[in-house]
Amino acid sequence: MSTLNAAINASASALNAERTRIEVAVSNIANADSTRGPDGKPYRRRDVVLEADTAHPFDAALGQAGVAGVRIAAVVEDQSPFKRRYDPSHPDADSEGFVAMPNVDTPEEMVNMMSASRAYQANLTAIGLIRELVNKSLELGK
């Protein structure tokens, strides 16, 4: 049964990671035109960095070490240069009439959001299949 629990825990950790990826993509899209943030600069695109989540130390002591899922290592800002758009009437335009725009590519963010959504659905399906397997096993025991 611990193998089934490990599979459910791995899928559950992936659900959390994919939810975060969706939230970050939505935030990037929502701020694609934000030319001034709290620091006075345009919004910087954010990206989620994932890493393998190793088994609990107690599991390692029992000889069950290994990867137990995925976790969010960080949410980092993309340091690529801001886009520039000519709009001399904009309040944030520089002396040449250019406005620094966020480094967000909306179509790319939509693809990221769809990818995370599909991965989320796949992990929900995996959890459902494990649950169904357990229920069928219990029925056989009757």
Image (spheres, grey):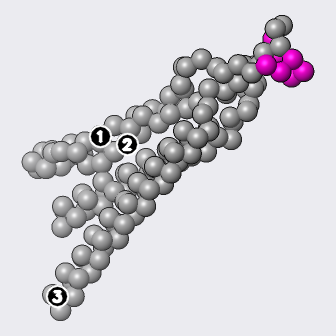
| Amino acid beneath label 3 | Leu
Q: Which mark is residue 140?
A: 3
Q: Residue at x 51, y 45 (%)?
A: 111
In the rendering, which numbered label is found on residue 52? Answer: 1
In the rendered structure, which segment of residues is drawn in magenta?
A: 86-94
**Separation of marks 1 and 2 at Cα, in angstroms:** 6 Å
* 30 relative position to 64: left or right: right
Residue 39 seen by the camera: no
Q: Residue furthest left?
A: 63
How far, Cα to Cα, is label 3 from label 1? Answer: 36 Å
Task: Please indicate whether residue 32 sits to the left or right of residue 138 in the image.
Answer: right
Residue 135, picture quadrant: bottom left
Q: Indicate which disc, 2 or 3, sits on the residue closer to the N terminus.
A: 2
Quick one: SS at disc 3?
helix
- Give left or right: position of 43 versus 78: right
Q: Amino acid at mark 1?
A: Ala
Q: Are marks 1 and 2 in contact (CB under 8 Å)?
A: yes
Q: Quadrant of residue 136?
A: bottom left
Residue, far right? 89
- Residue labelled with disc 2: 71
Picture residue at 41% right of the left edge, 39% below the top: 72
